[in-house]
Each structure stands twice: as structure tokens, then as C-alpha cells.
Image (cartoon, rainbow, N blue to C red):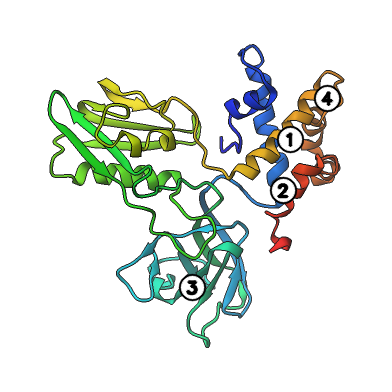
Amino acid sequence: MYEIVSLADIKSWLGITGSSQDDLFNQFRQAVTLIVENYIGKKVVTRQFTEYYDGTGMSKLLLRNYPVYVVYDTTTLPEEPTNITVHDDIDREFDDTTLIDASDLIVYPDIGQIGLYDDEASFYKAVQNVKVEYWAGYTRFNVISGQNNYLDVKEGSGSEINIAIDEAKTRGTVWPGYSAEDLASAIQSALNDDSNTALTYTVTYSHVTQKFTVAATGTFSLLFSTGTNSSKSMATLLGFSGDDKTGSSSYTSDDVVIGVPDDLILACQQIVDQMWQQAASGKGLLLQLSKSLPNGMGAMRNIVDELPPIARNILDFYRREYL
């Protein structure tokens, strides 16, 4: 769950077409995710975090994970974050009375910092009194108008319905786009809000399978190949092959889609390549990793010392001290 690299990416890199060693490669996926996240000091795949911090008496707070994925209410000035909540409560009850108003928050997504607008405001100086619920990670699905923002749908034997998805309303980050959950929600809303659709749609993303599912209360088709907007369809973005999907009330991605930056995928492939080459000797990174888990982070540091130079150079960019 939350693996950075897909099975298909690993097999493509190694030139493997069969499935007889898929179990081993899935172990590689888990191992390389653990190695990378330990080295850069944070999680990679975007998810929600609930964390507690000691208040410092200052107006800014550095979060453990970044970049922070923020969705803004663009009807307000300044634009207010809608998917991050911050409580400051020395009694640690964290009820509505201790919730900091979104209009008082400022978020610096790329460095993972939150602050208070009022220069005279500050977090109480206490122990574990600040509770932050937020989203962070590098997984992004970039919807680009006129390129990959259309779903052409047909309900039963009815007429084609053309659904356009808006570009993500994120800002202030070099990693723009939707999280997987927010993209699923945006597609679901667009389908259900369109005046031409009669069915009720549910769109989800599974971090277990790393695939999207589009389902409805009746039979419908996704016209990825023959639709009016086939050249601007969301098929590839959502992990579908590009062929029409017909005759069912539910469709799931053909391929795994993670949304992690390409250079991080390359770093993972470099590490996996080293695992693969060393596997036969029984002295590779995977064996060391399995032995290191009960012994704490000291043994893990020995493993990251052996990272391939290309992988290390890529991963250094994602460490906080680089920024």
C-alpha cells in the first residue's frame, strides 16, 4: 500500500515480460518505498496526516511531511485552504472552540510550513498542543484543459454526453494538480451535476490496487476511443487502455496509476536494478532490509549508503535540507 513504483514500471525497466517472479518484484516495490522514504525523511504518495506538535510561542510551524497538498476556496480573498485544519489547545481537547479559522492560516506548500496571518498571533508554548490535519505528498494527477480533461459517456442506448473536468484549483507549489482522491471526487461531481446524466455515479481510487473505479446505478459506456473528445480523453491519466468501455455499470483502470514524478520513479528503478543484480548472491539490499527492520534505523542507514549514485542524486533533491 502506498508503494512509489508500479509492478509494470519495475518489469519494464528490467526487461521482464513473464509473471513468474511477480511476488519477488512486489517485495522489491515495498522495500524500495521504505528505503526511499527513509532516505528523504517523508512519505511520497499523497495521503492525509493527523499530527501533533509542541507549540513554540512563534507564528510558524514546520510540518513533518511536504509538499503540502492544499485545495483553496477561490471565492475568498485571500484564498482560504479548505483541506487543512489546525487546532491550538493547551488542554488537548481539540474541539470547535480551539479550531483556527482558515482565514487566519497561511500555507507554504513546498517547504511544508504553516503560519498565522496576524504578526502578533502565535501558537501557545506548550506540549503537544497543536493538532494539524493535512494532506501531503508528491502524487499529482495533472488535468490540462484541451489535452486530457474529457470523459465522453453514454448511458444505455442514449446519446453521447461530454463531461469536462476543470483543472485543479491548487496554487503556490511546483507540484500542481489533483490528489487521487480529489480527482476521483471531481469526476464524480462532474458526472452527477451534469444535467444530461440520469444515473448516479461513484468514482473512487484505491491505494491498495492503485486504480480508479467509475461506477453507476445502471449500464453506461466510457467512449475513450470513439467519443467526440477521444483526442482529449482522460483515459491514460486514469489508467485505462484507451479502448471504449461498454456493457457494464462499473469500470476499473486497466493499469496501475500512481502519479509520482518521473525522476522519483527512475530513482526507484535504479535501486530495484541493484536489488535484482544482487539477488542471486543473497547479499542484496532486500536481504539486508529484512534483517534491519527489528534493529532500528542504524541498520537502515547502512543500506542507504549503498544506493546507486544516480538514485542518490535524485533523492537528495527531495530532502528538506536541500530546500
Q: Secondary structure at mark 1?
A: helix
Q: Secondary structure at mark 3?
A: strand
Foreground pick, 264 / 128: 264
Quarter of the rendering containing residue 97: bottom left
The Cα atoms of the two marked residues, 3 and 1, are separated by 38 Å
The answer to whether the residues at label 3 and label 4 have Cβ atoms under 8 Å apart is no
Q: Residue 106 got which mark?
A: 3
Point out the tag, 3 or 4, that comes first from the N-terminus: 3
Q: Which residue is mark 4?
A: 278
Q: Position of residue 125 (x, y in %)?
A: 61, 78
The Cα atoms of the two marked residues, 2 and 4, are separated by 22 Å
Dot 1 crowding, Cα within 10 Å, few <14, some 14–19, many 20+ = many
* Amino acid on which disc 4 is placed: Gln
In the rendered image, the residue lying farthest to the bottom is 120
The Cα atoms of the two marked residues, 3 and 4, are separated by 48 Å
Q: Which residue is mark 1?
A: 270
* Amino acid on which disc 3 is placed: Ile
- Residue located 62% across and 12% down the image: 18
| Mark nearer the viewer, 2 or 4 | 2
Quarter of the rendering containing residue 62: bottom right
Q: Which residue is mark 2?
A: 314
Q: Position of residue 106 (x, y in %)?
A: 48, 73
Point out the tag, 3 or 1, that comes first from the N-terminus: 3
Point out the tag, 2 or 3, that comes first from the N-terminus: 3
Q: Secondary structure at mark 2?
A: helix
The Cα atoms of the two marked residues, 1 and 4, are separated by 13 Å
